[in-house]
Amino acid sequence: MSYIIFAKTFDMDFRIPNIRHLRVFCEVSYTRRISAASKIVHLSQSAVTQAISKLETTFKLLLFDRRPEGMFITEPGSFFLKRVERGLLHVKKGALEALRASTKKNNMGNKRFDRLLTTAQLRSLIAVSETQNFSLAARSIGISQPTLYRSARQLENISGVPLFIKNKEGIALTKSALLLVKHIKLAFYELKQGVMEIESWHQRYTGKITVGCLPIAKTNLLPESICQFSKAYPYVNINIVDGTYSELLHDLRHGDVDFFISPIRDPLPIADVVQDFLFDDTMGLVVRSKHPALLQGEASLDNLSKYPWIVAPKKTPIRDYFNGMFSDAGVDLPQQLVESNSLIVMRSLLQQSDTIALLSRHIIKFEEQFNLLKYLPLDLPKTKRPIGITLRKDWHPTTTQSVFLDILRSIRT
């Protein structure tokens, strides 16, 4: 689930460029000659000229400086070229991984089918992956169902790899298709980054920064960062995405979020991400200000186990700590448990009942100031945990993304 937490009315109108035009753009930049590029991409010189013209019209700038001695790439064209190269490399990787993962016997798929793909086919594949249904996918990208179906099946024929499986719910994707989708989404992500950089070159700081977030950052860190950032860049939208750690990790690796904030994991769950330390956090037991356990004075886990608790989902570090806390004390786990990672539910339930929660000391900062919630006077050992930013290892942030990250790192929690 995602929602825009801060937005202005001006936004960048962006559509994924024609992937074949992007290949033409690369070859012209390498050869500096329309004639040489046309031979490489197997198009007429007029078609190559038209492709470059369409890209320049789309971005409202010159990608090349036309001189008698050839086509020389401009400054904004040069940094867009880097994004296009990264995007096309993802398309190539996706195609190769899809072929390797295919279970089709005697698979003789086209080993360079990435060069034959169209933007329409790739958009169709992503839409099907997100909706698991051809009709819903077509509606989501504004085309007819027959058009999308034809585009998706063309992609399957070009690759020589089975991509779709019918099931009771609709359409499922094969392992090959899922690998291809991951890299195509990262390719599109790179192109969007490139367009943001072109806008920045025009001194038009627009676009969107998408931040994944666990509850730890919602009370102070993110709101303060957004306020500071939006003063300098009022037309850049900030999109906050909620989710569990595993969901946000998936979104990060598929280009759906730029980075996310969470407790640092040691060891890292996968090798293609890195973590950037922000601050150390500690946890405590939270209750309403007039909770009976506060009035009784000294608290013990034996007494507290009789109350209802709101706990984090299973297989999360904070839930493991909760279980270990009672186990180490030789006390049975509480019988009344509500499992949730919703900060809204946690706060409401704590204020309206005798529920207890194991929470970060950053999360209830304002409720504690207004005497709505309090921490029980019970020392908990080994609750210190590092909080940080998780990013893709090969991520290249734009100017505005770098500024936002610098603000996050500068805020004292």
Image (cartoon, rainbow, N blue to C red):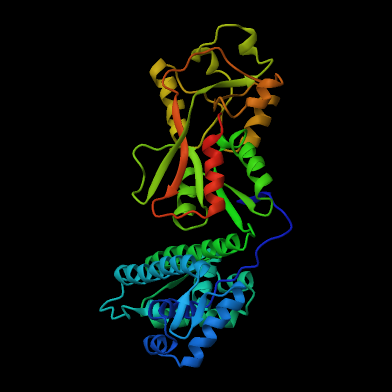
The residue most toward the front is: 68
- Mark count: 0
Question: Is 392 rendered above or below residue 125?
Answer: above
Q: x, y (%) of residue 162? A: 38, 75
**Is residue 36 shown above or below 388?**
below
Residue 257 lies, in percent from the top left, at 52, 53
Which residue ends up furthest to the right in the rendered image?
9
Q: Is residue 183 above or below residue 337?
A: below
Q: Residue 245 in the image: state x and y as whole percent.
A: 47, 43
| Residue 191 or residue 168, whichever sits in front | 191
Most extreme residue toward the top is 297
Which sits in the foreground, 151 or 69?
69
Q: Residue shown at 43%/18% (left/top)? A: 381
Pick the front one: 161 or 278: 278
Question: Which part of the image, by quadrant, shows the C terminus?
Answer: top right
Rendered location of residue 271, percent (x, y): 33, 49
Q: Specify the quadrant of the image occupied by residue 29.
A: bottom left
Q: Please indicate, yes or no, whether residue 411 appears anywhere in the rendered image.
A: yes
Q: Is residue 243 visible?
A: no
Looking at the image, which residue is at 52% across and 55% down? 398
Res 131 → quadrant: bottom right
| 147 relative to 321 in the view: left or right | right
